[in-house]
Amino acid sequence: MASASDLAVLQTIFNPTTPFGDIPALDEEEQLKDDDSGFDVHVLAQVRELELQGVCAAESGDVRAALERFTEAIRILPERASAYNNRAQARRLQGDTAGALEDLGHSISLSGGAGRTGCQALVQRGLVHRLARREEEAREDFQRAACLGSAFARQQVVNMNPYAALCNSMLAQVINKMRNPELPGARDL
């Protein structure tokens, strides 16, 4: 059986555009947990149900109802990060970028920028920054999320690094020539 290091090398050889060490299906973000142990279990259950209703409403296209559910969850348990993260997504769907950034900031602050919700909020805020062409802020959020285990964030960090993109392009050309030695220029290796 191949070790994690062996899998990382193989991944880099066969998929040179992925960051080194990034192994598909080995996304550490999936293993992150939020610490909800400090909340009353009955109140937490009520808030989780409201968030679930909000997510279902958003998925069915009823963003207004989703916002209502997330806002109610925040009203009941304002010190929990998850509802802020969810409401940020609904706000973003409505085009309220400033409101989304405000909620993501609350989510990151409440989570301490850790756990599953903190990681998701960092990725989402990074995407909002990137869409607004605030590359440095986006890169910082993606780097923090990558450190928490987000494979998507790691890929964004690589994509935003012009030197890494150039190296990945050159590596892809070399590997392509090795795979197809009959192509013109392959003998130059």
Image (spheres, grey):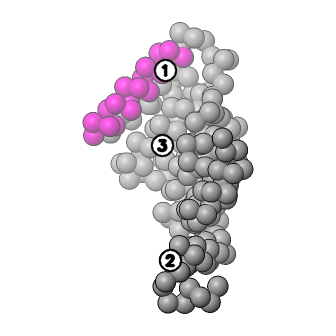
Disc 3 vs disc 2: Cβ atoms closer than 8 Å?
no
Residue at image coords 52%, 38%? 85
Sequence-wise, the earlier of marks 3 and 2 is 3
How far apart marks 1 and 2 lie (CA) works out to 57 Å
In front of the other: 139 or 28: 28
- Looking at the image, residue 112 sits to the left or right of residue 25; the answer is right
The residue nearer to you, when weighing 172 against 138, is 172
**Residue 10 spot, x, y in % from top left:** 62, 57
Q: Is residue 49 above or below residue 188?
A: above
Identify residue for label 1: 47
Q: Any mark on residue 180, and which?
A: 2
Residue 78, quarter of picture = top right
Q: Secondary structure at mark 1?
A: helix
Name the image quarter holding residue 156.
bottom right
- Residue 88 circle label: 3
Q: Which residues are magenta?
A: 44-61
The CA span between labels 1 and 3 is 16 Å
